[in-house]
Amino acid sequence: MPEGDTVYRSARSLDRALAGRTVTGFDLRVPRFATSDLTGDTIHNVASRGKHLLHRIGTHTLHSHLKMEGEWHLYHPGTAWKRPTYQARAIIETDEWVAVGFDLGIVELLETRDEDEAVGYLGPDLLGDDWDAAEARSRLAAEPERPSAVALLDQRNLAGIGNEYANEICFIRGILPTRPIGEIDIAAAVELSYRLLHANRDRPRRITTGNQRPGQETWVYGRKGRPCRRCGTPIRKGELGATELELRVTYWCPRCQT
């Protein structure tokens, strides 16, 4: 699933292409909003909120979430699309660009004044202008018994962390993903989360180790059975989640993390 830095870059690219332009074509290929038409309205901006995308058009906001397979592409009119037409869920046309949202997990149109109905539950946005570290710390500390990886992934605590970041943050801080969040240095985990997402927001290849060589980007994520980069112990893999329906793959070093 795309994480906050990926969505941030997508919003920035879309905003640069679309902001200030007039909609010349509008098509939402989901039953609830199939008859919606914002043709003639001005695109004010495109912004990210955690892992959510917000196209603000006229008095409306097109809210989308990429989930596992979603992507937004930009094409010049008449250019062939790189993904099949049947995967398109949202199409916004202007005089110079066609923005296409493929396999979006969420597509909904609402009045901009009602945006909070879609994203108001989110915690402080790690890449947002209104980032509030104190509020993020408070939210994480409110349920001290929750496993650290689960608490970090909960978008109600702080918005933008996905599974890769949660695993890498736990390793760098030397904590097991299952360790209760109330037993760790929450302030340090929040500060590290902020630094990692900001370090990666401007580059397409996510790096948490500081090593840009291919195959050296992560400490534990995706490295089951391979030696820990610090101690050589084989990395382990498991599953962890708030519920059985929310299980996520977890990686850790049994020696470096306690």
Image (spheres, grey):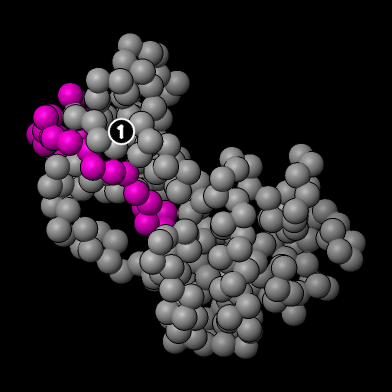
Q: Does the magenta stretch include residue 42?
A: yes
**Quadrant where the image shows the C terminus:** bottom right
Position of 238 compared to 123: left or right?
right
Quadrant of residue 55 within the rendered picture: top left
Residue located 38% across and 22% down the image: 75
Q: In the rendered image, is residue 244 in sight?
A: no
Rendering coords of residue 11 (x, y %): 39, 43
Q: Report the magenta residues as a range.
A: 24-52
Describe residue 164's horizontal placement relative to residue 61 as left or right.
Answer: right
Question: Where 135 falls versus 195 (above or below)?
Answer: below
Q: Position of residue 130 (x, y in %)?
A: 38, 66
Q: Where is residue 139 in the image (x, y as percent from the top left)?
A: 43, 81
Q: Given the image, on which type of amino acid does mark 1 rest?
A: Leu
Q: Name the residue under label 1.
A: 18
Furthest residue to the front?
Answer: 20
Quick check: is 230 in the magenta stretch?
no
